[in-house]
C-alpha cells in the first residue's frame, strides 16, 4: 500500500471521505465546501495538463489551451514521470470509463 510521508490521521480521513463519494453531484458538493474556487480551478487545470502531456501534446499547445504556466506544466510532467503515479492511474481509469461509455452507446438493442 502506498503511504506518503504527509499521511496522518486528518489526511487519512480526507482520503476516506473522497472514496465515500457516490456521484458527481457528491463530488461537486464536497469540492464546493472544501476548497476555494481558485483551488478547484488549479486542480482541474493540473489534471487537464496531465491529460494533455499523457497524450504527448507540446508545452506551447498546453499553455495556450489551458492557460497553465510552463512552471506548472513542468511540475505536472515531473509528477507524471517521477511521482506516485496518481495522475497516470486516474487518466487510465478515465480512459477505460470513456471507452466503456462509447461501447455502450454503439450497442444496439436486438
Image (cartoon, grey):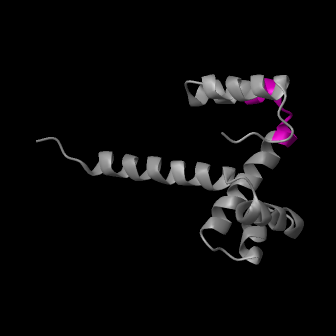
Q: Where is residue 16, by image quadrant?
A: top right
At horizontal 63% and vertical 28% (from top left) the residue drawn is 19
Principal secondary structure, stretch drawn in magenta: helix
Residue 92 lies, in percent from the top left, at: 54, 54
Of residue 60 and residue 8, the one placed in the foreground of this image is 8
Residue furthest left as drawn: 110
Q: Where is residue 52, by image quadrant?
A: bottom right
Label count reads 0
Of residue 10 and residue 25, the one placed in the foreground of this image is 10
**Magenta residues (range):** 31-39
Quadrant containing the N terminus in the rendered view = top right
Of residue 48 and residue 78, the one placed in the foreground of this image is 78
Is 33 covered by the magenta stretch?
Answer: yes
At horizontal 16% and vertical 41% (from top left) the residue drawn is 109
Residue 27 lies, in percent from the top left, at: 65, 29
Residue furthest front as drawn: 1
Residue 17 lies, in percent from the top left, at: 70, 23
At horizontal 72% and vertical 66% (from top left) the residue drawn is 81
Amino acid at each position: 500500500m502506498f503511504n506518503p510521508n504527509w499521511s496522518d490521521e486528518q489526511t487519512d480521513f480526507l482520503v476516506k471521505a473522497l472514496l465515500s463519494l457516490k456521484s458527481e453531484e457528491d463530488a461537486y458538493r464536497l469540492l464546493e465546501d472544501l476548497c476555494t474556487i481558485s483551488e478547484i480551478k488549479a486542480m482541474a487545470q493540473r489534471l487537464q495538463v496531465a491529460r494533455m502531456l499523457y497524450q504527448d501534446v507540446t508545452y506551447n499547445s498546453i499553455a495556450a489551451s489551458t492557460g497553465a504556466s510552463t512552471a506548472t506544466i513542468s511540475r505536472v510532467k515531473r509528477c507524471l514521470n517521477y511521482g506516485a503515479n496518481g495522475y497516470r492511474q486516474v487518466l487510465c481509469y478515465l480512459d477505460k470509463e470513456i471507452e466503456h461509455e462509447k461501447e455502450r452507446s454503439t450497442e444496439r438493442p436486438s
